[in-house]
Image (tube, helix red, strand yellow):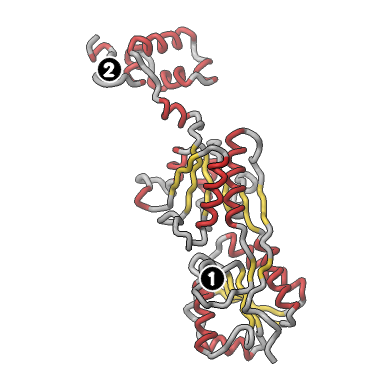
């Protein structure tokens, strides 16, 4: 046959070649060859015409493409909303990745890594999350996720599990998060137990859910203990010695700082304490809502709480595999406890 009467022009035959030979659309060919319910519902004569054309052309389905369509590629996607993937062990997100990788290997899955780099996003795609469909399902890691893109993927039935509490779409998005509210309240309770009656909570002006949860926990701790407190939003640029001395003059004896990716507020407050010639815990107590990952050598261990990052990654991957297997997981939202970790920077109030 010549190219004009339906034969492939060169190389292996394609579905477009079958469509021309059978006199149907390429979409009809795809439905018939996929052998799903929609394809089986087509007219028998149409199906036979498509199958006969495929036989005549010697068409063989691409196994990789077929597995991708059926979401049976045994690939777990992992997406971060950062420009580069956190493969450096000093990155606070790295333990999440280790946990996901461990569980994926235990379940017999490979991993496909995605980042939020602008360079990898197709033109006109708001968040580039459509790329995730290359995997069977995806674990999402990051402080901020575009709600509209999440809704679009969930509406399409694409399996997602978020690492961190995220109820921006209600109970539709399964997640494994850390109970920052209770953990932050426990830090305040520890300071109250030591005798502090006034503290300052310093947090960065980020409205991520993790930040809001930590502040809610501080306020809960203040209510539970009955001590006084002040919440300060800053990027660290205005945390100088004068402001520090002002807080101390107002009766503050303890400072609590939000743990973030940059630790900007912590670094600024710690620098001000050092520049003022003050020490922790002799002159004031300092606690962190989280833990200082890869603290500089010789730095006192901060009182805070341990985030079970590795276990969160493992559980998120396990939940995703359960979703893929149809064994439940939809609507599951888990919060893991963050145990208090008493360090070297807190003690009774200075006289």
Quadrant assignment for the N terminus: top left
The residue closer to the viewer here, 119 or 347, is 347
The image shows residue 159, relative to residue 314, as above or below, that is above
Asked if residue 32 can be seen in this view, the reply is yes
Image quadrant where residue 30 sits: top left
Residue that label 1 marks: 204
Residue at image position (45%, 55%) is 87
The image shows residue 171, relative to residue 337, as above or below, that is above
Crowding at dot 1, Cα within 10 Å, few <14 / some 14-19 / many 20+, comes out as many
The image shows residue 163, relative to residue 287, as above or below, that is above
Residues at circles 1 and 2 in contact by the CB criterion of under 8 Å: no
Could you say where residue 289 lies in the image, as x and y percent from the top left?
61, 69
The residue closer to the viewer here, 62 or 44, is 62
Q: What residue occupies the far front of the structure in this picture?
A: 298
Residue that label 2 marks: 8
Image quadrant where residue 160 sits: top right
Could you say where residue 114 lies in the image, as x and y percent from the top left?
44, 47
Chain-order first, disc 1 or disc 2: 2
Residue at image position (53%, 80%) is 270
């Amino acid at each position: 046959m010549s190219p004009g009467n339906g034969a492939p022009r060169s190389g292996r035959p394609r579905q477009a070649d079958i469509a021309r030979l059978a006199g149907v659309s390429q979409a009809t060919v795809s439905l018939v060859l996929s052998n799903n319910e929609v394809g089986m519902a087509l007219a028998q004569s149409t199906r036979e015409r498509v199958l006969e054309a495929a036989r005549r052309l010697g068409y063989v389905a691409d196994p990789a493409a077929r597995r991708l369509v059926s979401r049976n590629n045994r690939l777990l996607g992992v997406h971060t909303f950062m420009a580069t993937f956190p493969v450096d062990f000093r990155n606070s997100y790295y333990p999440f990745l280790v946990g996901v990788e461990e569980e994926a290997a235990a379940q017999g899955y490979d991993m496909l890594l995605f980042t939020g780099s602008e360079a990898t996003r197709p033109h006109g795609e708001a968040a580039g999350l459509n790329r995730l469909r290359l995997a069977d399902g995806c674990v999402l890691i990051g402080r901020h996720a575009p709600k509209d893109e999440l809704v679009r993927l969930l509406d399409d039935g694409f399996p997602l599990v978020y690492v961190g509490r995220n109820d921006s779409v209600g109970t539709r998005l399964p997640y494994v998060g850390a109970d920052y509210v209770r953990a932050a309240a426990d830090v305040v309770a520890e300071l109250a137990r030591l005798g502090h009656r006034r503290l300052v909570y310093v947090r960065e002006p980020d409205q991520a859910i993790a930040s809001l949860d930590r502040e809610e926990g501080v306020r809960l701790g203040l209510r539970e203990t009955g001590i006084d407190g002040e919440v300060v939003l800053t990027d660290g640029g205005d945390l100088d010695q004068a402001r520090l001395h002002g807080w101390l003059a107002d009766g503050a004896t303890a400072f609590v700082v939000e743990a973030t990716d940059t630790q900007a507020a912590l670094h600024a407050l710690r620098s001000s304490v050092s520049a003022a010639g003050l020490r922790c815990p002799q002159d004031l107590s300092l606690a962190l809502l989280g833990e200082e990952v890869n603290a500089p050598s010789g730095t006192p261990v901060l009182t805070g709480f341990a985030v079970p990052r590795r276990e969160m990654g493992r559980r998120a991957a396990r939940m995703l595999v359960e979703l893929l297997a149809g064994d439940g997981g939809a609507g599951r939202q888990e919060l893991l406890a963050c145990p208090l970790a008493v360090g070297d920077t807190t003690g009774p109030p200075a006289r």
